[in-house]
Amino acid sequence: MNKKELSQTLSHRLGITCKESQQYLDTLCEVLSEEFQKGNSICLQNFGLFSCRQQPGRPGRNPRTGVPAIYRPVPSSSSSRARG
């Protein structure tokens, strides 16, 4: 299911327009994004725990030339099923 399909399902179940359900989804995504940028995790009971963290840089090697290199730090996300 993509965002558009989710928006349509929400609009049918809640009895609102697709435009309103899209605004709700956009707001939810903004709130989640802001919390992840602050370094917070989000736990939705009976649904899941979502978190975002910075994965440190790591040593590596260019496979084509064999020259050692340091890979840059990258953001990483994880999710798990919440209990309770």
Image (cartoon, rainbow, N blue to C red):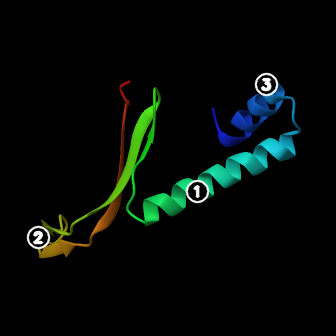
Amino acid type, label 2? Gly
Residue at 39% over, 39% down: 49
Q: Is residue 8 toward the left or the right of residue 73 in the image?
A: right
Q: Which mark is residue 60?
A: none
Amino acid type, label 1? Val
Mark nearer the viewer, 1 or 2: 1
For the residue labelled by badge 2, is the local secondary structure a helix, a strand or a loop?
loop
Residue 6, percent from left and from top: 69, 34
Q: In which quadrant of the rendered image does the N terminus lie?
A: top right
Residue at 67% over, 41% down: 3
- Residue under label 1, please give it: 31
- Tally of marks: 3
3 or 2: tag closer to the N-terminus? 3
Evaluate if marks 3 and 2 touch, with contact meaning CB atoms under 8 Å apart.
no
- Residue under label 2, please give it: 66
Disc 3 to disc 2, C-alpha distance: 57 Å
Residue at 85% over, 40% down: 18
Residue 62, percent from left and from top: 18, 69
Furthest residue to the front? 84
Q: Hey, which quadrant is residue 48 in on the image?
A: top left
For the residue labelled by badge 3, is the local secondary structure a helix, a strand or a loop?
helix
Disc 1 to disc 3, C-alpha distance: 23 Å
1 or 3: tag closer to the N-terminus? 3
Disc 1 to disc 2, C-alpha distance: 43 Å
Evaluate if marks 1 and 3 touch, with contact meaning CB atoms under 8 Å apart.
no
- Residue under label 3, please give it: 13
Q: Hey, which quadrant is residue 61 in on the image?
A: bottom left
Amino acid type, label 3? Arg
Q: Nearer the viewer, residue 84 or 25?
A: 84
